[in-house]
Each structure stands twice: as structure tokens, then as C-alpha cells.
Image (cartoon, helix red, strand yellow):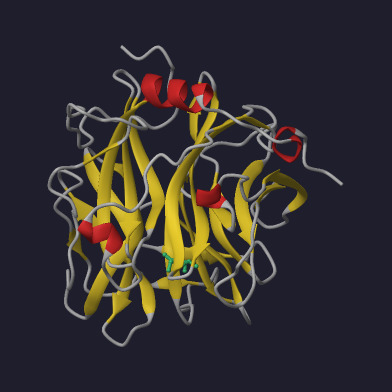
């Protein structure tokens, strides 16, 4: 029984492996059979990475960033009985506009999947006269209706909260540039209706610590816990050989999520394995989803590896919350409400 309580969607059949002996740093360990999705996973798709999954009807469903063999990314639906072996639809997700007409983005990448009340939302990055956030909703994973783009370009890494807070939908995002964005902080926006977004607040900036000293971005949808919103995000540093993407952790205030209560000064996971260090873009670990089990506190983290593979890692709510709190360093810009 986990001491830290987890609220929201929970499933006891998520993948799990016990913590191996000998972990010296953060209590996060990789699935021994990683990567769970390898190269050329489906016809016409060269690589799947940076993808989001969730429990669905006793099994699992996911939205996957599929890099087509022409190099253009799109989002594909996948299903699995065990959340490890996946089958992908051959066709891209057929997005429609609100009148039911085809409405496909020019490209789409880094999808997140979040259930709020009875609706599943997919949030991704796409062209809107520049890189920006696209959104769609579905209730049955058959019909996918695009909704208004929430923000102006340039913006990436949008992550919805799994419930309304103070009566409004909440979304994290990371304003960016049109290229590889050598800067970036996480902001929070809210909306009464998923159309109009405002009350923008700064949540947290790139870190003091070297592993996240270039930019940060939201990762998995925040997990509601008795300690606050547990957020797995990515932090980036620039080296003479390019960017390195690690996974970080923070806990946001439950009623005012622009306020950071705890922020771990250490990365939770950083590229170390061959599938993280070697691929289309080396040295990338990029979380897009977690699944959790409230009873045991088990958390499964899904992350893109080297823009080529999907990796799976595990942690446990009590341990990760304790680690983040024990190693927390917050700055004034983290703990303030984020309004100037
Ligand atoms: C970011 C995004 C991610 C990608 C990362 C590393 O800007 O485009 O999709 O994983 O770069 O290439």
C-alpha cells in the first residue's frame, strides 16, 4: 500500500518489474527488455518514439509519433493487451473538423493523451504557420475531432491536466522558436471551454543545474497525488556534441499548479543505454506518458529514446516523491504564482 495517494485513472495491470539491486541514484529503473518499440515497427513507419499510452477497456491504447519513411511525422493509434507489445493502425489517425470533414495537419509529433471526464484529448505539435500546438478529442477512438489550436506559434510540449482545477481546464506548454529552440520555460494556461485560453502563468524556468540549463518542457500529464501534481518533464543541456535530454521531476501545488512545491535538483533518468545514446538523435530521453496503480503506487514511465525507440521505466510513488523532496531545490521563480 502506497503512503502517497494517487488519484485519477489507475490500473493494476500496468507493466511492472521490481526494483533491481544496486540502484545508486534516483529510484527509477528501466524495463529489462527495453526498448519496447524498435525500428521499422509498421509498414511505412521507420521509427516510433515520443508517444503516449493509457489504460483502456481492460487493455491499453496509445497515440504514437510515427516517423514515416518519407521523414514526416504523424500520429498513429496503437493497441496492446500488455502495454509492451503494440499493434499499430496502418493509417494515420483520421482527424476531422467539427463538421466532419477531413482536417489533417501537415505534420504532427510528440502526442500526449489525456482523459478528462468522459473525453480523451490528444495534444501534439504541428504546423500552424510555424510550430504550434494542435488538439483533438475523441470518446471512442474511432472519430477524432480537431478543436481550436490553443496557442499562437511557436509553442511545443503541451500537456493537459487530467481534471479541471478551480473549474477550468489547465494546460502546460513551452513557448519556443521555429527551430531547435535554445531556451524555454514551462508555462500554465487555463480555459473554461477548451477554446479560449488565458490567465497564463510561469511555472518553472530552465534549471540552475547543468543537466537542464538550456530549456525544459512538460512531459507526461501530471499525476494527482496527496503531495501535489507529480510532473515528469524533460530538461536539456547543450554540449559541444549537441543537446542532451534527461528526465526531471517536480511537484506542483494541487490548487495553484503554477507554484512549484518541490523540484528535484538531480535528473531522474539520463541517456545511458545504447537505445538512448544511439539513434536518429543521440542522447534523448523524452517522457510523454505515465500509467499508475493507486493501490501499490507503481508508476510506469513511457519515454522516447534517441528519437528512434520507445523505452519504459518504473518507479514507485512513495520513493519518487521522497527522492524529489529530499533533493528539492526551488528558486523564487519556481515558487511564485508566475504572474508579472
Ligand atoms: C525536440 C522535439 C522532440 C525531440 C527532441 C530531440 O525539439 O522535436 O520531438 O525528441 O527535440 O530531437
Pick whichever, 112 or 317, lies toward us.
317
Split into quadrants, the picture shows ligand 1 in the one at bottom left
Q: What x and y, as percent, mark residue 138?
A: 43, 55
Q: Residue at x 64, y 59 (%)?
A: 184
Q: Residue furthest right?
A: 340
Q: Residue at x 45, y 24 (%)?
A: 321
Image quadrant holding the N terminus, namely top left
Q: Is residue 24 above or below residue 204?
A: above
Q: Residue at x 65, y 53 (%)?
A: 185
Q: What x and y, as percent, mark residue 57?
A: 25, 41
Q: Residue furthest front?
A: 240
Pick whichever, 215 or 15, lies toward us.
215
Q: Residue at x 39, y 63 (%)?
A: 143
Q: What x and y, as percent, mark residue 28?
A: 32, 35
Say which quarter of the image contains residue 10: top left
| Res 63 visible | no
Amino acid at each position: 500500500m502506497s503512503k502517497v495517494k494517487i488519484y485519477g485513472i489507475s490500473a493494476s495491470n500496468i507493466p511492472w518489474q521490481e526494483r533491481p539491486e544496486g540502484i545508486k541514484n534516483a529510484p527509477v529503473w528501466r524495463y529489462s527488455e527495453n526498448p519496447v518499440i524498435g525500428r521499422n515497427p509498421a509498414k511505412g513507419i521507420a521509427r516510433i518514439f515520443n508517444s503516449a499510452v493509457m489504460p483502456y477497456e481492460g487493455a491499453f491504447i496509445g497515440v504514437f509519433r510515427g516517423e514515416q519513411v518519407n521523414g514526416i511525422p504523424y500520429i498513429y493509434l496503437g493497441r496492446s493487451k500488455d502495454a509492451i507489445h503494440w499493434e499499430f493502425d496502418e493509417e494515420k489517425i483520421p482527424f476531422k473538423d467539427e463538421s466532419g470533414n477531413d482536417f489533417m495537419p501537415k505534420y504532427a509529433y510528440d502526442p500526449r493523451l489525456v482523459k478528462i471526464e468522459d473525453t480523451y484529448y490528444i495534444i501534439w505539435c504541428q504546423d500552424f504557420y510555424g510550430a504550434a500546438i494542435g488538439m483533438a478529442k475523441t470518446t471512442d477512438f474511432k472519430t477524432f475531432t480537431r478543436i481550436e489550436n490553443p496557442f499562437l506559434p511557436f509553442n511545443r510540449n503541451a500537456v493537459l491536466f487530467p481534471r479541471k482545477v478551480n473549474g477550468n481546464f489547465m494546460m502546460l506548454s513551452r513557448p519556443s522558436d521555429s527551430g531547435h529552440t535554445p531556451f524555454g520555460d514551462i508555462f500554465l494556461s487555463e480555459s473554461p471551454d477548451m477554446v479560449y485560453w488565458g490567465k497564463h502563468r510561469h511555472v518553472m524556468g530552465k534549471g540552475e543545474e547543468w543537466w537542464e540549463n538550456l530549456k525544459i518542457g512538460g512531459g507526461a500529464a501530471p499525476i494527482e497525488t496527496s503531495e501535489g501534481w507529480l510532473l515528469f518533464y524533460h530538461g536539456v543541456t547543450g554540449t559541444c556534441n549537441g543537446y542532451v535530454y534527461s528526465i526531471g521531476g517536480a511537484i506542483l501545488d494541487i490548487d495553484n499548479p503554477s507554484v512549484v512545491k518541490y523540484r528535484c535538483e538531480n535528473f531522474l533518468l539520463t541517456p545511458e543505454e545504447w537505445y538512448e545514446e544511439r539513434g536518429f538523435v543521440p542522447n534523448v530521453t523524452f517522457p510523454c506518458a505515465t500509467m499508475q496503480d493507486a493501490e501499490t503506487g507503481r508508476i510506469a514511465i513511457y519515454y522516447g529514446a534517441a528519437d528512434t525507440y520507445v523505452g519504459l521505466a518504473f518507479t514507485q510513488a512513495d520513493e519518487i516523491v521522497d527522492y524529489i523532496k529530499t533533493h528539492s531545490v526551488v528558486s523564487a521563480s519556481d515558487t511564485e504564482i508566475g504572474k508579472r
